[in-house]
Amino acid sequence: MATEEPRAQPETLTAHAEELTIDRVERVVGSLRARKRVETDVVEQLIPRAVEDCDVERIDADANDSGEVVTLPDGSISVPLLEEELVITKRTVVRERIVIRKRVETRQEQVSDYVRRERIELEADPGVVVDHDDEPR
C-alpha cells in the first residue's frame, strides 16, 4: 500500500494594480471687482432771469398830481428794485443698476496619467509541470 504524503499548503502571491481616481476640486482662478467711480462734469446753461432797474425821469408835475408821496427823513424816496435770484439745487438720482451673475459651465477636458499594474510571471525549472491558465487578471 502506498503511503500518501501530506500535500503542501499552496503558496499565494498577490498582484496589485493602481487605479486612476479623478476628483474635482474648486480653486480660485481670479476675481471680479466692481467699483464706483465719480465723474464730475460741468453743466452750463443759459437761463433768462428778470432784473428790475429804474430809470429816473424828471417831468413837470401836472394838475392832477396829488402830491402825496412818502418821503424819507433825509428827503429822498425809496423805491424797491427787484431781481430774480437763481436757485440751483442738486439731488442724487438712481441712474443705473448693475446686476452681476456667475454662471457655471461644464467643459470636457481630457486628462491622462500613468497607472502601474503588477503581473505575475511564472518561471519553472526544467521538468516541473505547472498547471495554470495564462489569462492575467
Image: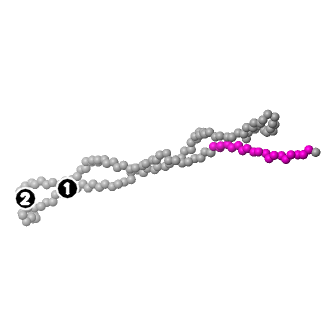
Quadrant of res 61: bottom left
- Residue 101 badge: none
Give left or right: position of 45 versus 25: left
Residue 5, x across and y down, in percent: 86, 46
Quadrant of res 128: top right
| Disc 1 element | loop
Of 60 and 77, the residue lying toward us: 77
Give left or right: position of 102 versus 116: left
> Callout 1, which amino acid?
Glu
> Callout 2, which amino acid?
Asp
| Residue 7: in magenta span | yes
Residue 91, x across and y down, in percent: 33, 55
In the rendered image, which residue does mark 1 sit on? 83
Residue at 80%, 38% (x, y): give it: 130
Give left or right: position of 23 versus 38: right
Quadrant placement of the N terminus? top right
Mark 2 / mark 1, whichever is N-terminal: 2
